[in-house]
Amino acid sequence: MTKTELMTADREIELIRQLNSCDRGDAQYKRTLDDLVLSNLGLVHKIVSKFPIKTSSCSYEDLLHEGIAGLVHGIQKFDVSRGYRLSTYCYRWIQAFVGRYFQNHGKTIRIPVYLATKDMKSRKAVEQLTEEL
């Protein structure tokens, strides 16, 4: 993965406003979206690298693609007027897309997402209680 320069907040706002003023099929829309995605690929990589890929049937590339899909979704839903940075807003979207893909495809036997989430919360609670006691 190549390293790209971080985008300034003013440049982000300018590109988001440009993105919102274009039609989705327009070439300018695609160029602007590409610029935003490329400048935030490091964030996607950081989130994807936290998942235990070695013990699952998911590959790094699969999770990276899902992370990029989450990033694109977050970019399209981003609202400049709220005052947040783009990366702060998109972090949750990337995490949600990658997490859902990992839960659906990461194990040999598929467990529904809501049960996997409950299981993860209970394991964290057990670990925390074990440390305290």
Image (tube, rainbow, N blue to C red):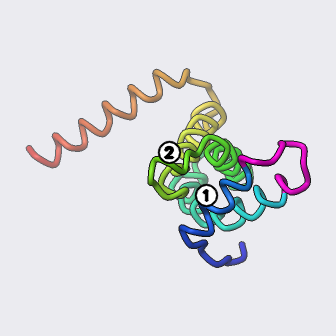
Residue, x 54% and y 67% (percent of image)? Answer: 9
| Residue 109, quarter of the rendered image | top right
* Residue labelled with disc 1: 44
- Magenta stretch encompasses residue 98: no
Vertically, is 101 above or below 27? Answer: above
* Label whose residue precedes the other's in the sequence (1 or 2): 1
Q: Look at the numbered disc 1 and give the secondary structure of its residue.
A: helix
Q: Quadrant of the C terminus?
A: top left
Do the CB atoms of the residues marked 1 and 2 lie less than 8 Å apart?
A: no
* Residue labelled with disc 2: 92
- Magenta stretch encompasses residue 21: yes
Q: Nearer the viewer, residue 42 or 5?
A: 5
Horizontally, residue 47 falls left or right of residue 65, namely: left
Residues drawn in magenta: 20-30
Q: Nearer the viewer, residue 93 or 24?
A: 24
Point out residue 98 in the picture as x, y percentages from the top left corner. Answer: 60, 43
Horizontally, residue 120 falls left or right of residue 29, namely: left
Residue, x 60% and y 60% (percent of image)? Answer: 13
